[in-house]
């Protein structure tokens, strides 16, 4: 019973807050994040986040379905050929977008700039700090681009392509960092294997899927039972996501692959139409959950205890923004809105939170440093939507909705 | 990850099994129940049902969303005025459909027919046995009627009306029986209060809701954020269901009320259309879960240990069918397909399972008697869809899809 009430309140608060924010000219996802913070652990405590609450894992699973459905929708809308045309610049953007923040974060932590001087195993902590700065939350940027109806611009393809490559790299970094946290020696072989699994899964799934899916869904389409097509597509999405995770890749990589695969079937439009209400309900739960995880008390500037955390968090926030911003200039041979791409790579969202969580659980990150990293993650996540909107309005985007090829996709 | 795989497999198995059963000329819900049994605790063990599995409560919650969404859809399609026209016969059907099985079950248990003679506090056990026979699973019948496209017949309205009244009576019986199980004295005042709360909630919610909802949803309809109408309707459904449970009524009563209320708004069609894919995904989970709870091993006729259980279960099954069947003749002043109504009231579904579960937990029902009751519950649930289809085909239904008033509703 409480579960129903909590879910109902989350959805209502998300939508009304999203509406308010959209009326103020900002992307709706911002409203969902803020609604999550307000309903979350540190303010109203409506959304359960603690390990002791039996509802926490249920809300967490629903939120995970939300991000998986979101990535599926993005995959459905992805034009593989158009994506391939931005393959080289997207790879460049991703590589710079991972390397620059990592280096800046690492150097900041071991440098004399950081006061008080880091204690303990400074190198491990510095690697962790650098790692949390590398992630890109494709979910946030994709929602913003979709809220602004720019999903078929070159910038959107570049950002999404780079973000997916980022996720693959992120998995490798996560593997290395988890190993470090566990005190294990990091082997070059292990790194290469993680990378190969993630890339291999995506390539194999899409290649095999695009060959088989049109036949399978043609067969499903001849079935008569109510909703069989949509439910089959949804089940396909869940199974591919689970398979990706099983293969050592990530749920969202599988979901993205499922979307790309089904975009090549003849039943594509029915699936997209039916999936929309499902996404409308689940996706906000993901953004609300991100917001709910934030403890705003640790950021209260009136409490002197928080000043150190706020200073480190502020420094990491600036590093995080600058590190991703330069990735916009990573592919000088192509013309696009460099500010939009750099800003689009900035939100850390859930991926950054996962990194920080591992560091905290492993004892590598202190409570204060964890709060500072959260400040960076939430800061970049909250600041990116309005900045991206501004950058797109200021310098425009390449390839508009009127591009006939994009519409066919 | 396992959660995604389980969910995907459940949905696929449910749909494909439903398709197969529908091709065999039977309602799809039967296939979902059978798929649930096959994937369930006693055969393949894909669907987690045990208390030890962390996925069990999550699947249970999703199944609960499923039945709530189903009742909401039924409420949306309900024509209140047409329902009111069958108010008197529906009440008669419900009262006979509760009284007859209860008396028959009670008498069977205390009579010499039942061998070996019941031991312990035979009267309490007999009341429990009678109570588990009273429930009607509106979900199963509604799905069958909807699968057969007979939702706007007089028979459907009668069954649904009687089933809702049955649910209200069921809550009262549940309260009494739980009190008995806890060893408490049952007061007439408590019985009257439970009844008043359940009826009062339904009347108050529908009266207040139909007055306010058109304005509220007219306002929501002017909002611009993506999916706001559907998400608001879904949240309204969840909150009303939670409120109903809070007020001492049942989740499904609140969900049914939410559907009736929103059927009176101008946005009714958009809501119904958007809710369809959501129901397509969630509703099968409910029927799969019912099937998954069944331990088919206890029914193995080759094991002599099970013979007593099978004999009692068989007797209860016959009593359950006959007791509800006579309810079809409860309103002699109206003309309708009496066999269809009597059979439509027969499936015990989840409500019977809940009763049996309480009896087992409280120690009133022995393990053998519990298995026998489950046989009755699942038997009536499996047998009702094909029998209902047969009865409707044999004697037809009153008031067809061409009834203009029904189409307006």
Image (spheres, coloured by chain):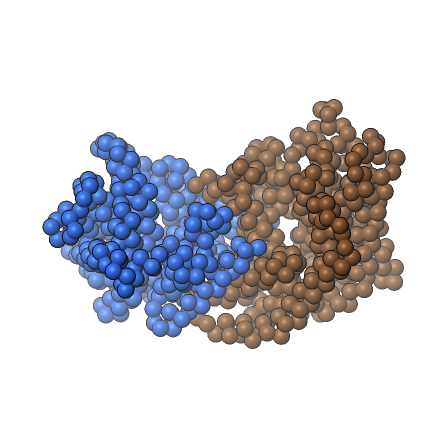
Chain colours: A brown, B blue
Q: Position of residue B196 (x, y in %)?
A: 28, 36
Would you say B254 lies left or right of A283 here?
Answer: left
Quadrant location of the C terminus of chain A in the rendered image: bottom right
User: What residue is at 78 percent from the left and 57 percent from the top?
Assistant: A188
User: What residue is at 80 percent from the left and 52 percent from the top?
Assistant: A97
Would you say A26 lies left or right of B191 here?
Answer: right
* Whether residue A299 can be seen here: yes
Quadrant location of the N terminus of chain A in the rendered image: top left
Q: Observer-nearest residue: B327 or A250?
A: A250
Would you say A349 lies left or right of B17 here?
Answer: right
Q: Observer-nearest residue: B62 or B207?
A: B62
Q: Is residue B59 above or below residue A315?
A: below
User: What residue is at 84 percent from the left and 34 percent from the top?
Assistant: A114
* Whether residue A339 can be seen here: no
Would you say B135 lies left or right of A265 here?
Answer: left
Q: Position of residue B274 (x, y in %)?
A: 50, 56
Q: Observer-nearest residue: B85 or B376?
A: B376
Q: Is residue B122 above or below residue A273?
A: above
**Quarter of the image holding residue A23?**
top right
Q: Position of residue B311 (x, y in %)?
A: 21, 58
Q: Observer-nearest residue: B301 or A361?
A: B301
């Amino acid at each position: 019973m409480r579960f129903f009430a909590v879910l109902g309140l989350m959805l209502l608060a998300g939508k009304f807050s999203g509406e308010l924010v959209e009326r103020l000219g900002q992307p709706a996802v911002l409203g969902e994040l803020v609604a999550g913070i307000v309903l979350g652990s540190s303010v109203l405590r409506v959304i359960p986040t603690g390990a002791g609450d039996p509802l926490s894992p249920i809300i967490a699973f629903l939120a995970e379905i939300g991000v998986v459905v979101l990535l599926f929708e993005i995959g459905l809308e992805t034009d593989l050929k158009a994506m391939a045309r931005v393959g080289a610049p997207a790879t460049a953007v991703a590589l710079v977008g991972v390397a620059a923040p990592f280096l800046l974060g690492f150097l900041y932590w071991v440098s004399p700039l950081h006061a008080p001087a880091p204690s303990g195993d400074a190198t491990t902590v510095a690697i962790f700090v650098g790692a949390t700065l590398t992630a890109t939350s494709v979910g946030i940027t994709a929602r913003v681009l979709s809220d602004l109806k720019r999903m078929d611009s070159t910038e959107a393809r570049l950002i999404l392509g780079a973000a997916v490559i980022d996720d693959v790299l992120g998995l490798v970094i996560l593997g290395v960092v988890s190993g470090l946290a566990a005190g294990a020696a990091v082997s070059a072989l292990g790194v290469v294997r993680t990378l190969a699994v993630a890339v291999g899964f995506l390539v194999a799934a899409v290649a095999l899927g695009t060959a088989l899916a049109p036949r399978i869904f043609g067969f499903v389409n001849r079935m008569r039972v109510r909703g069989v097509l949509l439910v089959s597509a949804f089940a396909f999405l869940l199974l591919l996501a689970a398979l990706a995770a099983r293969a050592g890749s990530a749920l969202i990589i599988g979901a993205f692959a499922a979307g790309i695969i089904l975009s090549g079937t003849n039943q594509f439009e029915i699936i997209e139409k039916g999936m929309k209400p499902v996404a409308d309900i689940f996706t906000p739960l993901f953004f609300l959950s991100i917001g709910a995880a934030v403890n705003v008390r640790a950021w209260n500037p009136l409490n002197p205890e928080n000043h150190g955390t706020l200073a480190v968090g502020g420094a990491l926030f600036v590093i995080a923004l600058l590190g991703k911003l330069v990735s916009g200039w990573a592919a000088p041979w192509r013309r696009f809105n460099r500010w939009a791409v750099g800003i689009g790579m900035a939100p850390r969202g859930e991926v950054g939170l996962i990194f920080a969580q591992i560091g905290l659980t492993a004892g590598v990150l202190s409570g204060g440093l964890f709060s500072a990293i959260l400040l960076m993650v939430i800061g970049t996540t909250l600041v990116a939507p309005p900045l991206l909107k501004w950058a797109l309005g200021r310098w425009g985007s390449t390839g508009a909705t009127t591009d006939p090829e994009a519409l066919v996709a």
